[in-house]
Amino acid sequence: MIDLSGAVLTMLSVHYVGNKGLGQEIVVSKKPQDLRDRDRAIIKDAFLSKFQEKPELYSFHHLTSLDYNEVYNYCLGALAEITDFHKKSADIAKHLHEATVHPKVKPGELYVCYFEGCGVNGAMVEAIGIFKTETRTNFFDLNIEGSEIQGELKEGIDLGKFDKACLVFPTNAEQGFDVLIHDSNRGEEAVFWRETFLSVMPQANEYFQTNQFMNLTKQFIAKQIPQEFEMERTDQIDLLNKSVEYFRANESFNKEDFEKTVFQESGLIRSFQQFGESFSEANDFELPERFDISTQAVKKQARVFKSVLKLDKNFHIYIHGDRDMIEKGYDAAVGKHYYKIYFEEET
């Protein structure tokens, strides 16, 4: 459980990191920023706002001398000795510059923050925040003197719209710290921030396990079943609904019980097990037979379990419950398929 409501920004260093692959330079500041208390509070709120609902924890990997993780070691040094904070922030900026060779990665400002008063599992700890802004915005700066108002168009940074970020807590240090990440980008840029620069991997906790197993189930029903079995779209949606309901109704997951409850038929169960083995091998992790279910992961995944029956471009039918209340047929007279829906009352 992470609580950032009482966090305080105590130090901030800002650097500019260009794309080395495109011949762009890095500008390393000589000292940390001098901030007023009001500035600290505004910057803190802007930077931490994206992390209020980030349940997925990561950890740094490649921690040995053979596979050195730069960001982990620089954060370790900054957390161990606060007088080294600015130097370590400059090291982080230099490492980012060295790593930025992909042509799609944009230049921008790098903010390295030192926070105190972060709650992690009931303990108050420090944290290192690394934030990157890549987009500038125009704003109108107004100067009011007496009855005169003079405006000037300027360009600046909207701190609440940073592009990439991570928050590093000193908990779970031997396994690579507890890390939260944010990236507004997708595809290659997201892979760059997560893997090339930070070199972090998801922690195999209940959130990760629930998220992965629900993702596995969704892919099996949507992609594998149509290849192996003749099944109506309504029956596929029924399986999706049953799988989500299983995760919502139970506090712990039991794979054998899940298979019998959702798929029931031996042929479907065998196919699901084989698909699960291929899924685990392709994603390089092993899903356990039992684990505690994360309600946050269920809430997130339930949004993408599409229980929608699309009929040409005319109708969308949302199926949330009893599969027996919808019946498919074919009208030879008009040459079209139809669905008959039964209900007790209209709401």
Image (tube, rainbow, N blue to C red):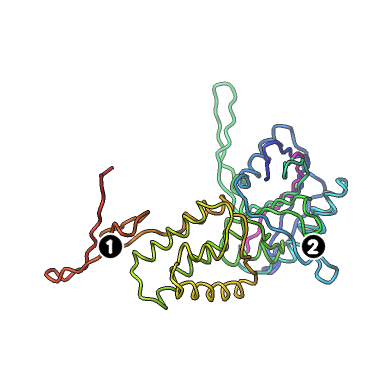
Looking at this view, is 22 or 146 the one in front? 22
What are the residue bounds of the magenta stretch? 105-117
Label 1 crowd bin: few (<14), some (14–19), many (20+), radius 10 Å = few
| Direction top: furthest residue | 146
Q: Is residue 289 left or right of residue 179?
A: left
Q: Is residue 20 left or right of residue 248?
A: right
Q: Position of residue 234 (x, y in %)?
A: 34, 64
Q: Position of residue 115 (x, y in %)?
A: 75, 43
User: In the displayed structure, would residue 37 be above or below residue 51?
Assistant: above
User: In the displayed structure, would residue 32 be above or below residue 88?
Assistant: above
Q: Is residue 29 left or right of residue 296?
A: right
Q: Quadrant of the image for the N terminus?
A: top right
Q: Which residue is mark 2?
A: 70
User: In the displayed structure, would residue 260 be above or below residue 126?
Assistant: below
**Quadrant of the rendered image containing residue 209:** bottom right
Q: Residue at x 83, y 50 (%)?
A: 78
**Quadrant of the rendered image containing residue 116:** top right
Q: Position of residue 174 (x, y in %)?
A: 81, 58
Q: How many marks?
A: 2
Q: Which residue is mark 1?
A: 313
Q: Residue at x 72, y 44 (%)?
A: 121
| Direction bottom: furthest residue | 228
